[in-house]
Amino acid sequence: MNLRIHTLLIVLIASFGLHSCTWLDTAPEDLVLADDALETEEDLQALLVSCYDVLANIYDGDVQLINELRGDNTAEPRSNGDLQAIYARETIRWNSYVGGMNREFFYPVLRVNALFDAFNFVPGISEETQNRMRAEGSFIRAFCLWGAVKIWAQPYGFTADNSHPGIPLPTAFGDNTYPRATVAEAYAQIESDLAVAIEFLPEENGVFATKDAAKALLAQVKFLQLDYANAAALASDVIASGRYTLETPSNSEEFLRLRLPIDIVSTETIFGTVSNPGISDNRADKFGDWWKPLTNPEITLDPALYQWYTQIATGSAEDGRMAWLENHPAEGQLWLKRFSEYDYFNIPLIHLTQMMLIRAEAYGELESNLSTAIDDINAIRARAGIVSDVYLLDATATAEDVIEAARMEYRKETLGMGLWVEQLQRRGTMGEDITIRNAPWDCDGMALQFSASEGNVEGFTFNPVGGCN
């Protein structure tokens, strides 16, 4: 990335169209230099809101689908070659969709860096306001770096010291180039940003990031680092706040919209994006594009998932989440209906159920606080409509029972949201014999390939190609 800041303020063009931008190189024509572009606190707040805007553009269904295709929930895409390459773990430098998504992760980071630099040029901002803006920006940057490192690098724990290649870390606005940092360095940056966010974010902040959101994101980070004590403690802090409650759907339509409402924010949402049909602002459009059940939908679920879902131990006959599935055995297809019945909905990127299940499994791994873990799992199963004692954990449940149940419910509750593959990789780093569609969890193709344009930086290391078949 080559950006020069003199005495002028740098803002992104109004259309925010950085189409030639990569992690490492930003074309000068993609920026506007103006000495009066950012003059007031209101201008900075508008730039901050734009950071949220581009973050929402990434998580409109595209990132979620990329991660689903890397896991074992989906069947092979029907016809889209870029998606088929992700599924086959054979992405190359010229895969336009993957390269485009890599650039999308960079846009919010660039804007956050511009915001932080602009503090030096805009007078009269109170320390409290600057701390709050810096905390929000740090949260957004951490969220994007976290999302990217999970896709374009092998997971935390792939090497003993996490010295394997991670992602570039552009954390300053200036004349710098950024080759790939290590995964250890990427996680350290994410944790550093979240420490700022936790310290200075408010507890209430409308639809924007809060202290709880930063804690909940850090809980996920710690969980993948196998730091179960801190993961459980952070999740418990958020749960104990009392600001979030489980939704209680009572029929199939309400189950389809579980955590995906419109006009309101779900009572479970800790951080998410908001659609506004009144102004045709759809933050969920890609979910519909990829998953809508037509005659031949592009994306379907692996039919084996239906057999897993209906096994007796899950209580599927009572499970309202079965409304999410539409089985077509004659065609050998299993459709996910959840994202296709409505054109608009809000997306929970971090939510209460997720925190409860992370806490439950963490306690199972620690072999402590099992009664709390059992209560978490049973509350989620009961909300799903499962009431038979045979499907609920009793007080004699072992740590192994808790871990198995937490994993089962996590897979169900996050279906289609792209959060399952990272759990399989985590278990691989724990030493479990994990295969993902008949390939090792750590085979070369699991880390997607960077765009060819990244090779413009001397010494840039690309991911190995293939190796999963």
Image: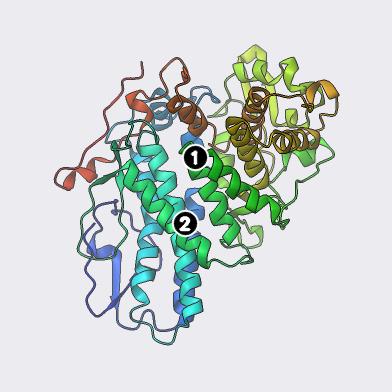
Q: In the rendered structure, which amino acid carries the disc numbered 2?
A: Leu
Q: Position of residue 96 (x, y in %)?
A: 33, 39
Front residue of this view, candidates 132 and 446: 132
Q: Residue furthest top?
A: 330
Q: In the rendered structure, which amino acid carries the disc numbered 1?
A: Asp
Q: Position of residue 230 (x, y in %)?
A: 54, 45
Visible residue check, residue 191: yes
Numbered tag placed on residue 194 in the rendering: 2
The correct choice, above or below, for 29 with respect to 95 in the image is: below
What secondary structure is found at the residue carrying circle 2?
helix
Q: The N terminus appears in which quarter of the rendering? A: bottom left
Front residue of this view, candidates 37 and 436: 436
Q: Residue at x 45, y 83 (%)?
A: 125
Q: Residue furthest bottom?
A: 124
Q: CA distance from mark 1 to mark 2?
A: 16 Å
Front residue of this view, candidates 148 and 330: 148
Q: Which residue is the site of mark 1?
A: 227
Is residue 219 toward the left or the right of residue 382 in the image?
left
Numbered tag placed on residue 269 in the rendering: none
What secondary structure is found at the residue carrying circle 1?
loop
Number of labels in the image equals 2
Q: Residue at x 33, y 81 (%)?
A: 121
Query: Which mark lies nearer to you, 1 or 2?
Result: 1
Q: Residues within 10 Å of mark 2 (few under 14, many from 20)?
A: many
Do the residues under discs 1 and 2 have CB atoms within 8 angstroms? Answer: no
Is residue 317 toward the left or the right of residue 303 in the image?
right
Query: Of marks 1 and 2, which one's residue comes earlier in the chain?
Result: 2
Q: Residue at x 24, y 59 (%)?
A: 27
